[in-house]
Amino acid sequence: MNELAIHVDHVSKQFHLGTKFSYMRFSETLLETGRSLARTPLKWMRPQTDESKSHQDLWALRDVSFKVQQGEVVGLIGRNGAGKSTLLKVLSHITRPTKGRVGIAGRVGSLLEVGTGFHPELTGRENIYLNGSVLGMTRSEVRRKFDEIIAFAEVDDFLDTPVKRYSSGMYVRLAFAVAAHLEPEILVVDEVLAVGDARFQQKCLGKMGDVSKSGRTVLFVSHNMTAISGLCSRAIWLDAGQVKTDGPVKDTVAKYLTAALESSLSRHWTIDTAPGTNKIRLDAIRVVPCQPTDLLATDTPFTVEIDFERFENSGSLNV
């Protein structure tokens, strides 16, 4: 039986959002301040006791639990804002969970976003050794991998240039090469591979496949379902900070794409936002394939369903 590499146990993450205030001209601010002081001269001296008015709470993760075995390649999928990147930051110890626990067995190599883990004033060479020391490797261990990293990243001519001079593509190439070649037991990769060109993306996917075959664990976030399906054996679908589905990659991706298709083929309005007049109001519009399993194409028959309210019974209705 394989040993656990990652154990996420009822993890939740809360962020505090500042309240938005409207802006006023300086003269308006002075006038409003004077009026407030005239009405309640000592109000400005009283401490603010109701902290709920100064911020709003956002739960990026809600009671997330799953386990990943050593050597497993797992894809994290979901819409923007679903909590995928927040979860990876929790696993990489960049941020702490508000509730719950995370267990990690081994060193974690993370590639989360452009700029993470590199010092902009240091050269590419210096950042390679810096990242190695962060992973707990000695200088001699990093030196043994150095040539492989440079060859993979294709930044030979810029090795002694500060990375702040790098393009985003060069930055990502070097960052991925460092994360993948310094032999972490767990490799965590976010959507940043989208910055590179198509050839380098394929190169990275191939390297992640090699990493997994060597018995190391890979956690991969992407909106590219082809890449997820080709690389991963299992996928976790996050929706609004919660685990929607966790299972074989083929089944999970199919459920996710079906839900995304259904969402894109329908539109609903509230009473306040619905288009219409004083005679008629639209409530919903849906595009429905004639067969539930069909994907809409130029030659696929479909039905348009419209929900509406009519406020006058007289006269004809043309759609």
Image: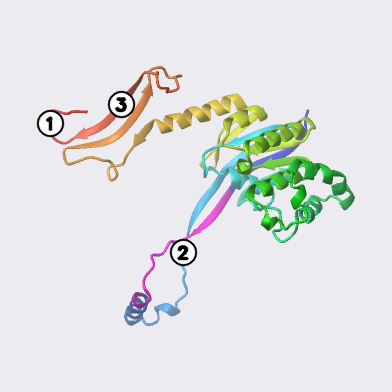
Mark 1: which secondary structure?
Answer: loop
Sequence-first disc among 2 and 3: 2
Q: Does the magenta run of residues contain 14? A: yes
Mark 2: which secondary structure?
Answer: loop
Residue drawn at the location 37% of the way across and 24% of the way down: 288
Residue 214 vs residue 113: left or right? Answer: right
Sequence-first disc among 1 and 2: 2
Looking at the image, residue 97 lies above or below residue 213: below
Which residues fall within the magenta stretch?
A: 13-28
Residue farthest toward the left in the current orientation of the protein: 314
Residue 205 vs residue 58: left or right? Answer: right
Residue drawn at the location 35% of the way across and 78% of the way down: 27
Between 282 and 106, the one lying in front of the other is 282
- Under mark 3, the amino acid is Glu
Residue 294 visible from this viewpoint: yes
- Under mark 1, the amino acid is Asn
| Residue 201 on image: x %, y % | 65, 37
Q: Does the magenta run of residues contain 111? A: no
Residue 319 vs residue 230: left or right? Answer: left
- Badge nearest the viewer, 3 or 1: 3
Residue drawn at the location 75% of the way across and 32% of the way down: 212
Would you name the residue on which mark 2 appears?
Answer: 54
- Under mark 2, the amino acid is Ser
| Pointers 3 and 1 in contact (C-beta within 8 Å) | no
Residue drawn at the location 63% of the way across and 50% of the way down: 97
Would you name the residue on which mark 1 appears?
Answer: 313
The N terminus appears in which quarter of the rendering?
top right
Would you name the residue on which mark 3 appears?
Answer: 305
